[in-house]
Each structure stands twice: as C-alpha cells, then as structure tokens.
Amino acid sequence: MRRILVTGGAGFVGSGFVHHLVAHTDASVTVLDKLTYAASRDALRALPPSRVQLVVGDVADADVVGPLVAAHDAVVHYAAESHNDNSLDDPAVFVQTNVVGTFTLLEAVRRHGTRLHHVSTDEVYGDLDLEDPQRFTESSAYDPSSPYSATKAGSDLLVRAWVRSFGVRATVSTCSNNYGPWQHVEKFIPRQITNVIDGQPPKVYGAGRNVRDWIHVDDHASAVWTILTRGRIGETYVVGADGERSNLEVARQILEHFGRSPGDLDLVADRAGHDLRYALDSAKLRTELGWAPQHRDFEAGLASTIEWYVAHEDWWRPHKQAVEASYAAKGQ
Ligand code: NAD
Ligand code: DAU
C-alpha cells in the first residue's frame, strides 16, 4: 500500500491517522476533505508536502472521488458529519455526507477494485444500562439512537452489502469516544477544558451519569492501520481501550487539573435521546490481529490533552464564542 487516500483527513481523528501514516509507514497520502467548519489545515501543517497532499472536495461528488480512488491502492474513509448535537438541529447534511458520501465512495472502489476501510462508531450499537455486565462486541445488534448514529449505521450496512453483493474488499471498525489534540471545541472534553481556561464552569448534560469509553486518538490510528493491513475482508472490528468514565468524573478531573473545586460545574439541559453508556470489548482486534492500545492511563492522557489546549489557544479561540452562543441558545 504505497498510495493511500484518506477522506476526512483534515478532521480530528482523520488527521491523527495521517500523522500515524507519516510516522510509521513510507506511504504517500492524499487527503480528500471538504474543509467544513470541523476541519483544520493546521492539523496537517507540520507534515512534509512530499508525503501528504490535500485535495479540497466532497466525498459525495463522484467526479472528484472516481479519479482519486483510481490513483490509490487503498482508501480509509473518515469523512463525516460527526457531532450528535448538530445532527439533532439539522440532520440533512448528515444523510448527505455520511450515507450518500459513503455510497459514492463504495461505487468508486467497486469500479476500481480498491481496498477500503470504513471508519465507524460504537454508537451504531445504541447504548447500555449503567450496570449491564455486557459490553458491545462485533455481534451486538445495530440499534442507533440519534440522526448521526443512524447515518453511520446506514453507511456500515451499505459497506457490508457492497462486500457481499459486489465483492468489494472492505473492512469496518466501530470505535469508542476519542480524545487528544485537534478535537473541535464543540465536543465534550475540549469544551470543558476551554470553559475552565475561560474561568467558566464545565457544562454537563442532565445528571452527568452518562458513561463514555475513552480512547486516545493515536490508539485509534494504530488500530485502523492494523485492520487495513491485517484485517480480514468483510469483517468488522470493535476498537476500544477500556476507558469507561462518567461525564461527571471527567469534568471533575479537568477542574482539579486547574486547581478548581470539583463541584464547580453546571448541570444543563440534557441532549434529546442521550445515550446512557457505551462500553466496548475489543478482544477480537487484540487476539486476532495483535493490536493493543499504548495510552492505557486515561488520567495521564487527559492531563496531556489539557496541556495541549493550554498551549494551543490560538487554534481553538476563534471558534469558542460561536460554539458557546449556539449551546447557550439551547440552554446548554
Ligand atoms: P470531525 O468532525 O473532526 O472531522 C470530519 C472531517 O470530515 C472534517 O475534516 C470535515 O471537513 C470532513 N468532511 C465532512 N463532510 C465532508 C464531505 N462531504 N466530504 C469530504 N470531507 C468532509 O470528525 P472526527 O471526530 O474526526 O470523526 C471522523 C470519523 O471518525 C467519522 O466518520 C466518525 O464517525 C468517526 N469516529 C469518530 C470518533 C470520535 O470520537 N471522534 C469515534 C469513532 C468514530
Ligand atoms: O462514541 C463515539 C462517538 O463519540 C463518535 O462517533 C462521535 O463522532 C463523537 O462526537 C462522540 O460522540 P458523543 O456524543 O459521545 O461525544 P460528545 O463529545 O458530543 O459528548 C460526550 C458526552 O458528553 C456525551 O454523553 C454528551 C456529554 N456532553 C457533551 C457536551 C458537548 C456534555 O455533558 N456536555 C457537553 O457540553
């Protein structure tokens, strides 16, 4: 795999994968990205232009996608609208990018016989009770809750059908919540870090009991590379790092990092349809393909992520006011 096309490679998770490719392989990389509000050219700026090329375009545009797919050995598909709250406000663009975009890509890889890895989410499996001893595995039923997760589930099912009906060489991964550098301030961890930097309280939805299973973005990147190179065609792999924490626990840890009282937070209006808990069992990926996460200490990873946001205020500051105004209008 000398030439790899990465859709959505200017976003949070996709850019982490592009960094991984440059650091750990000798592949040349083309990023196809529409550069929506969520994208960041800065996340790619440190990478050598001899290794990484950016093409600005829409993954749902067959005229752009076709020639790019034809010129690469493999495609890794991250491009998506990714924020649940936005999908509740305006689902149309989620259907267009996440479903029609994936369909467009599938037709191109079918035509050119190109290997595809489709990056999906644990949210396709719905949610778990707080006390449920089961965790999600590859055989968990699809049961998405939000417009975002429904479009991701739809895209996964398209991939499965294109594998079975047309022999497309594809794999799917369903990963849990990522944290680390370059995540947009609309998302939970960056929003709360930047609130505390601004002297504001973290804004926690509902009672804050909801649990997410956190994984460092670099570990997601190594998992995707492992699946792309060693995964079995047609298979799905759950990606998780055993990082379950409640939202209250995470918000309190951020406050404590800055020497603030752990009780100094605001409980705000809940998200409609808010999934209660995600928890993943990634035994298949670990035993079959030998993958393991490197960032096993969530508290240490969160501390270094906080320090990254402290050091990169010039990057997130231009977006902060508009994001907070939009949340405030919804009582969040
Ligand atoms: P993000 O919103 O930070 O980045 C998405 C990127 O896709 C942006 O660069 C954006 O410009 C690009 N994009 C959007 N629409 C496009 C279009 N029509 N054509 C081309 N590019 C387009 O999202 P993220 O958090 O980095 O998530 C990336 C992928 O990883 C998504 O598919 C998401 O479902 C999946 N994922 C994310 C997480 C997580 O915790 N962030 C976990 C599991 C899976
Ligand atoms: O599980 C994987 C998914 O993780 C990805 O597929 C999504 O693309 C990604 O955005 C993320 O989805 P979540 O909805 O879990 O992430 P978010 O950061 O929006 O919220 C995390 C938790 O924090 C969730 O329970 C909602 C809550 N929350 C969020 C925000 C923005 C708050 O309590 N307060 C907030 O201000």
Image (cartoon, helix red, strand yellow):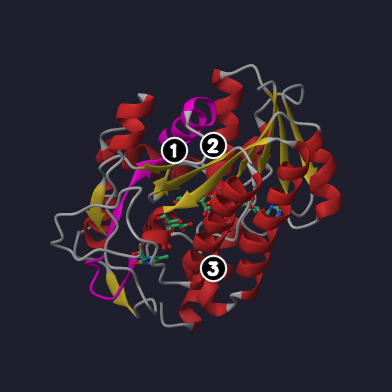
Picture coordinates of residue 292, whole percent (x, y) = 33, 28
Residue type at numbered disc 2:
Gly
Residue at x 44%, y 33% (from the top left corner): 223
Q: Quadrant of the N terminus?
A: top right
The residue that mark 1 highlights is 220
* Residue contact between numbered discs 1 and 2, judged by CB atoms under 8 Å: yes
Report the Cα–Cα distance between label 1 and label 2: 8 Å
Q: Secondary structure at mark 3?
A: helix
- Residue at disc 1, CB closer than 8 Å to ligand 1: yes
Nearer mark to the viewer, of 3 and 1: 1
Instruction: Indicate whether 299 appears above or below 258.
Output: above
Q: Measured from the top left, where is residue 137 in percent x and y? A: 31, 48
Can residue 313 be spotted in the picture? yes
**Marks 1 and 2: which is nearer the front?**
1
Q: Residues within 10 Å of mark 3 (few under 14, many from 20)?
A: some
Up the image or down, 303 lies above or below 36; here it is: above
Residue at position x 15%, y 60% in the image: 132
The tag earlier along the polypeptide, 3 or 1, is: 1
**Chain-order first, disc 1 or disc 2:** 2
| Disc 2: which residue | 16
Please provide the residue range marked out in magenta: 201-230
Q: Quadrant of ligand 2?
A: bottom left
Look at the image and say whether residue 77 sits in the magenta stretch.
no
Which secondary structure, mark 1? Answer: helix
The residue shown at (64%, 75%) is: 92
As rendered, which of 193 and 291 lies closer to the eye? 291
Disc 3 or 2, which lies upstream in sequence? 2
